[in-house]
């Protein structure tokens, strides 16, 4: 990761918190006072974002020293010291919340991803994210998914073609049903040679139509594990190259293994980024 690319976001976060106008610290902390603090995990999780918060500290005050105490992607237990921060005491206190916000958010995404990954162990399924990300944070949140052992779906609309029902509804021909899917796949392949083509379907009939059209991936949207199992059987019966099957929609930690055992190659989960709780962290002065 090129962490320098996120300096704009760091600056915006510091400005948002008015970190350089910390009235409480200015009133109570004597000039010249130095301090050492530890960032500790308050819950079990996966560390993510340490290189970014190192940059937060340096960007706020070059006299701050930041020491990473765990590795990116490492599992941490409650009470674990994830990092140490030392230098001017006023800077330590003023930058505290910005550091914890970045680290807690990214570690939370990595932690939730790791839980989903753990729950499909032993199946062929891999856990994927979606584009349901915080505006401006997409690259960071998708990085956190990777730290948690997951995989990234397309980063943006130019990365991969994903044909949905709304695209089919707006085709500039009168084609319907299987013919519309086939025509859409052909048009996309002609316009975007070399790009992966995926087709979203809502039932087994649409899955059969998509299978005949020959995309690289078929997304089984909001389908049950049993429907995924039946779609997998259809795919196995197809001669020649077979598309990957991606289960998506309403998948939870309790049900994700059912989808993996049903034969899904990919399981995409928007909750990894739009609903992950931040990892509980604290910053404590220790010297």
Image: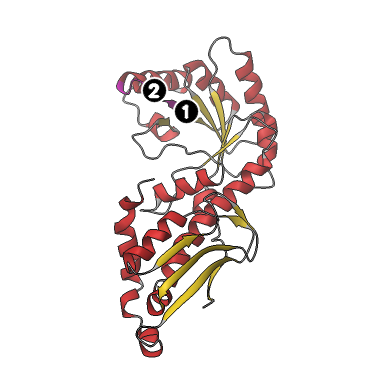
Helix, strand or loop for disc 2? helix
Placement of 274 over or under 193, stated as above or below? below
* Magenta part, dominant SS: loop
Q: Is residue 175 visible?
A: no
Residue at the (30%, 22%) spot, across then down: 191
Counting from the top left corner in percent of width and height, residue 60 is at 33, 68
Considering every residue shown, the one lying at the far bottom of the view is: 27
Q: Is residue 208 magenta?
A: no
Q: Are the residues tagged 2 and 1 within 8 Å (C-beta)?
A: yes
In the figure, is residue 238 to the left or right of 181?
right
Q: On the rendered structure, is 249 left or right of 159?
A: right
Which of the 4 image quadrants contains residue 94? bottom left
Query: Which residues are drawn in magenta?
Result: 191-198
Q: Which one is in front, 54 or 12?
A: 54
Please give the label number shown on residue 199.
1
Question: How far across and how far down the image is residue 256, in percent?
Answer: 65, 41
Check the image and report above or below for 197 versus 24: above
State the separation of the CA atoms marked 2 and 1.
Answer: 9 Å
Up-down: is 283 above or below 213? below
- In the picture of the structure, the residue carrying the numbered disc 2 is 184
* Foreground of the two, 101 or 256: 101
Counting from the top left corner in percent of width and height, residue 214 is at 48, 17
First in residue order: circle 2 vs circle 1: 2
- Residue at the outermost top position: 239
Q: Residue at x 47, y 21 (%)?
A: 215
Crowd band around label 1 with a 10 angstrom C-alpha radius: few (<14), some (14–19), many (20+): many
**Disc 1, SS:** strand
Q: Position of residue 254 (x, y in %)?
A: 69, 47
**Is residue 45 depicted above or below 270 in this figure?**
below
Task: Using the rendered view, name the quadrant where residue 203 is placed.
Answer: top right
Disc 2 residue crowd, few under 14, some 14–19, many 20+, Cα 10 Å: many
Viewer can see residue 153: yes
């Amino acid at each position: 990761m090129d962490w320098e690319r996120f300096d704009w976001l760091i600056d915006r976060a510091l400005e948002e918190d008015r970190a350089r106008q910390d009235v409480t610290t200015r009133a109570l902390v004597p000039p010249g006072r130095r301090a050492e603090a530890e960032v500790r995990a308050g819950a079990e999780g996966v560390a993510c974002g340490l290189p970014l918060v190192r940059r937060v500290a340096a960007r706020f005050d070059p006299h701050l020293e930041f020491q990473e105490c765990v590795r990116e992607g490492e599992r941490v237990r409650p009470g674990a010291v994830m990092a140490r921060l030392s230098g001017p005491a006023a800077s330590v206190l003023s930058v505290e919340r910005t550091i914890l916000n970045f680290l807690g958010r990214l570690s939370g995404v990595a932690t939730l991803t790791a839980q989903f990954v753990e729950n499909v162990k032993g199946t062929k399924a891999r856990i994927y994210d979606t584009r349901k990300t915080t505006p401006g944070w997409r690259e960071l949140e998708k990085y956190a998914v990777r730290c948690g052992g997951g995989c990234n779906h397309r980063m943006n609309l130019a990365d991969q073609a994903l044909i949905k029902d709304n695209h089919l509804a707006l085709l500039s021909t009168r084609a319907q049903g299987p013919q519309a899917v086939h025509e859409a796949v052909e048009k996309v392949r002609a316009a975007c040679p070399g790009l992966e083509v995926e087709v979203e379907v809502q039932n087994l009939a649409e899955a059969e139509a998509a299978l005949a059209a020959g995309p690289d991936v078929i997304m089984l949207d909001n389908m049950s594990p049993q429907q995924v199992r039946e779609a997998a059987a259809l795919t196995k019966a197809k001669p020649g190259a077979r598309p990957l099957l991606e289960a998506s929609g309403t998948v939870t930690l309790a049900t994700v293994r059912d989808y993996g055992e049903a034969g899904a190659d990919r399981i995409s989960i928007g909750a990894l980024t739009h609903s992950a709780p931040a990892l509980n962290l604290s910053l404590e002065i220790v010297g």
